[in-house]
Image (cartoon, grey):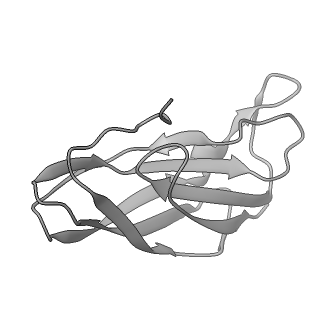
Amino acid sequence: MHPFGFLSYTTFTYHDLKLSARLIGPAGTLTISVTVANRGTREGTEVVQLYVRDEVASVTRPVRELRGFPRVTLKPGEARTVELRLAAGDLAFSGSDMKPTLEPGTLRVFVGPNSAEGLQASFELGS
């Protein structure tokens, strides 16, 4: 069985994951950048997947939530830096009272080719 998002006719690698900040406020936006390279022999289009995990929340949260998935087409040997933006408001969830909730705490981002692989980094959502 393959993880969600798995399929390619060439080989892509990911490196140089960077976050624009280690702390964002409730009205802030985080920019996430990663370099994607085509190491295969064919041109290909990769769907760069961004997942987020809330390390500690007042309600049970998914292990990884898909929050972005831009496409990038690369020729063999080509590399490109891809930027993804994550607004603090995108991290809201339904609380125990079923109202939108945005809780401060540690969040982890995962960027990669599918739901099981990739690079990861952490940041804090402040109050």
**Residue in the foreground of this view, choosing between 52 and 103:** 52
Closest to the observer, 71 or 31: 71
Asked where in the image residue 60 lies, by quadrant, the reply is top right
- Confirm whether residue 89 shows in the render: no
Front residue of 98 and 40: 40
Residue 67: give x, y in percent of width and height.
Answer: 51, 43
- Relative vertical location of residue 72 with respect to residue 79 in this rendering, above or below: above
The image position of residue 76, as x and y in percent, is: 11, 64
Residue 46: x %, y % from top left: 27, 49
Residue 127 is left or right of residue 93, and the answer is right
- Residue visible at 74% across and 45% down in the picture: 102
Q: Is residue 37 visible?
A: yes
Residue at the (10%, 54%) spot, across then down: 42
- Left/right of residue 109 with respect to residue 102 in the rendered view: left
Q: How many marks?
A: 0
x, y (%) of residue 9? Answer: 20, 44
Q: Which one is in front, 51 or 26?
A: 51
Extreme top residue here? 98
Quarter residue 91 falls in:
top right
Q: What residue appears at the point 45 percent right and 44 percent down from the top-left corner?
A: 114
- Looking at the rendered image, the quarter that the C terminus falls into is bottom right
Q: Is residue 37 above or below residue 69?
A: below
Locate residue 52 relative to residue 36 in the image: left or right.
right
